[in-house]
Amino acid sequence: MNRLILVLAESALETVPQALWGHPEVRRNSRERGLSPGEILLDRSYHHRAMRYLKDAHKRGRPDIVHFSLLNALETPLSDKGLLRVYVHTFQDFILEFNPRIRLPRNYMRFKGLMEQLFRIGRVPPEGEVLITLRKGSLADLKNELKPDMVIGFSSGGLLKPLQNIVLELTNVDSVMTVVGCFPHGEFKEANVKLFDSCYAIYPKTLNAWVVVARLVYEVEKSMNLNLKETNI
């Protein structure tokens, strides 16, 4: 494996849908933020009652999951060495692409502000070197664009297998696209499951997305001997 492609798929990251703009919770939150209802992120912590009327609400409104997962991917030796490409595919079929040079804010509210800016103008920052881009696209579109040799999904409903063994089997595959579901509950959409060459579970119980991301990145680092190279052991 020359480089790992990590996709956080069907991510619970989106602006408030128009159907909820008039709800009191949304209006209050938008006033507090100084933004219009359509410019703020859907967040169950603030919009729980409003989301009761939303289709597939159990999979939506959790930007914090995306935040934790991105920090566990981008703040790593694998990313620092330029050996990790990170994408976020959202529930509403948008694709976010991250420059490896980015340093995401660790503060959640600052992260939300960054994502809201991204959804408004399509890039961050507005000028200068582009660190994040946003475009419309499905997971299938991303696969067709990247043309990986293999696509591996991770899901609690997948075949249970030790992560170390999974990564070991990928050693001789040049381009691997790994897909981690970045939503609070439920399973991947069937159309997305069909894109996987294999789908694995790495623990008998459901794990949070950011835990899977952290373990996956570390196993890939070990397979590339990155830690040994850094410490000269």
Image: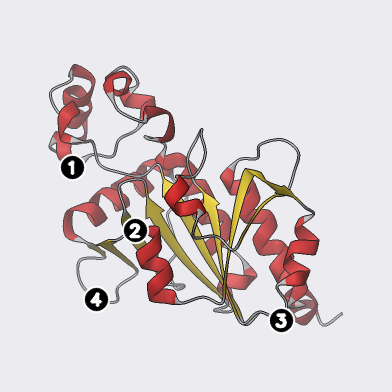
In this rendering, does residue 31 appear at all? no
Residue at the image point whose x is 43% and y is 75% from the top: 146
Front one among 6 and 210: 6
Which residue type carries mark 2? Ser
Tell me: 58 left or right of 227: left
Please state which of the two labelled residues, at mark 2 or mark 4, is closer to the viewer.
2
Residue 44 lies, in percent from the top left, at: 37, 28
Instruction: Establish if 50 lies above or below 219.
Output: above
Q: Which residue is mark 4?
A: 128
Q: CA distance from mark 4 to mark 3?
A: 38 Å
Front one among 70 and 208: 208
Tell me: 161 left or right of 105: right
Q: Is tag 4's residue or tag 3's residue first in the polypeptide sequence?
A: 4
Q: Could you tell me which secondary element the residue under label 2 belongs to? A: loop
Tell me: 168 left or right of 84: right
Q: Which residue is mark 2?
A: 138
Question: How many other residues sit within 10 Å of disc 4, few (<14), some (14-19) or many (≥20)?
Answer: few
Is the C-beta separation of discs 1 and 3 under 8 Å?
no
Question: How many other residues sit within 10 Å of disc 2, few (<14), some (14-19) or many (≥20)?
Answer: some
Quarter of the image where one finds residue 163 = bottom right
Which residue type carries mark 4? Gly
Residue 180 lies, in percent from the top left, at: 55, 53
Residue at the image point whose x is 71% and y is 81% from the top: 172
Q: Could you tell me which secondary element the residue under label 3 belongs to? A: loop
Q: Could you tell me which secondary element the residue under label 4 belongs to? A: loop
Q: Is tag 1's residue or tag 3's residue first in the polypeptide sequence?
A: 1
Tell me: 18 left or right of 138: left
Residue 122 lies, in percent from the top left, at: 21, 61
Numbered mark located on residue 39 in the image: 1
